[in-house]
Amino acid sequence: MESFPVIDLSKLNGEERKPTMEKIEDACENWGFFELVNHGISHDLLDTVERHTKEHYRKCMEQRFKEMVASKGLEAVQSEISDLDWESTFFLRHLPESNIAEIPDLEEDYRLHLHFLFSIFYGILKFMKLMKEFALELEKLAEQLLDLLCENLGLEKGYLKRAFYGSKGPNFGTKVSNYPPCPKPDLIKGLRAHTDAGGIILLFQDDKVSGLQLFKDGQWIDVPPMKHSIVINLGDQIEVITNGKYKSVLHRVIAQTAGTRMSIASFYNPGNDAVIYPAPELVEKEAEESQIYPKFVFDDYMKLYAGLKFQAKEPRFEAMKA
């Protein structure tokens, strides 16, 4: 069986550039996923982000999740749950405008002492600053990767970034997730199977607690947790722009009975009014039928995706043709 593609980005700067680019090409064509090491984001920053993210979950999110589980009686379910995910999440928006000041804090019930409140508030401020710094590093990496994809596709440098730009620039945001221990992982998924709607996704995941899987060649394959790596996967918009040369891939998160899995997924997506369509260079001029993907406004696709996320992507593409 093929091994999951791991790309050493530092090798782009030397004699191994060509085989490294070939590995990226193979990963994009045949996996839709790959894992980056030596990607340029400092290990100290990654360690600090991981530590503060896990601390934030323990202080601000864990109790809420336990209360949600209790209120829905999830610990005692006897049949498969198909409309709920075993995850605790919140979202941060970085571009075009930031909402990072809205990071979830504690409910009033937990604000019992002034000293305790001050320590939590100070911790939230540190977390906000840290996530801003991390987002800037990921944004640079995303744009570097888009240009590497352009190079492999034979597109002009910057083509994908311009395709995503719209009138106000790209959308860039982060989903911070924790997957606590689950008593019934055979009945409740951490996150149900789906493809991602957007452009390119950069995931910093827990290196101790696994769970992420992708669907390839008729079977589910584990995405290996690796210390200090960044997992990359391609969204539906890359599939459209490349006219199917690169494809978004079905993936899911399996809940675990032990350990809380941390997941920080950052989405570099087109702007709301960006018009998405196959790159003309990737459509054979001899046959009009060779353009098999639709042309649409990204925000229209997202409105459709909101209700169909956990269904097959092909009907979404067909609906956008209409």
Image (cartoon, helix red, strand yellow):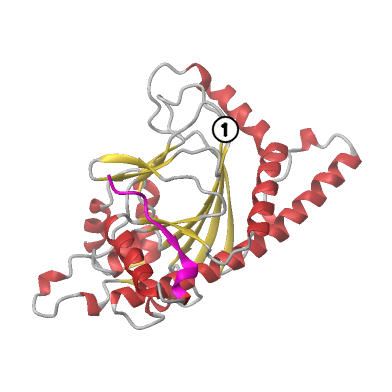
Secondary structure type for disc 1: loop
Decide if residue 156 is in sight here: yes
- In this rendering, position of residue 62 left or right of residue 314: right
From the top left corner, tell me how far across and down residue 253 is, in percent.
Answer: 43, 39
- Read off the residue under disc 1: 180
Left or right: 90 in relation to 105: left
Residue under the image location 29 percent in, 59 percent down: 247
Kindly identify the residue that appears in the image at 47 percent across and 32 percent down.
255
Query: Quarter holding the C terminus?
Result: bottom left
Residue 69 image offset from top left, x and y in percent: 56, 26
- The stretch of residues the image draws in magenta is 1-12
Instruction: Pick whichever, 2 or 28, lies toward us.
Output: 2
Question: Which residue is located at x 47 percent, y 67 percent?
Answer: 9
- Relative vertical location of residue 67 with respect to residue 91 in this rendering, above or below: above
Q: Residue furthest front?
A: 15
Question: Residue 33, located in which quarter of the rendered image?
Answer: bottom left
Count of marks placed on residues? 1
| Residue 292 drawn at (x, y percent) | 18, 65
Between 130 and 154, the one lying in front of the other is: 154
Residue type indicated by callout 1: Pro
Q: Where residue 278 appears, x then y in whole percent?
A: 26, 72
For the N terminus, the image quarter is: top left
**Residue 319 falls within the magenta-colored stretch:** no
Is 7 colored magenta in this rendering?
yes
Residue in the foreground of this view, choosing between 273 and 144: 144
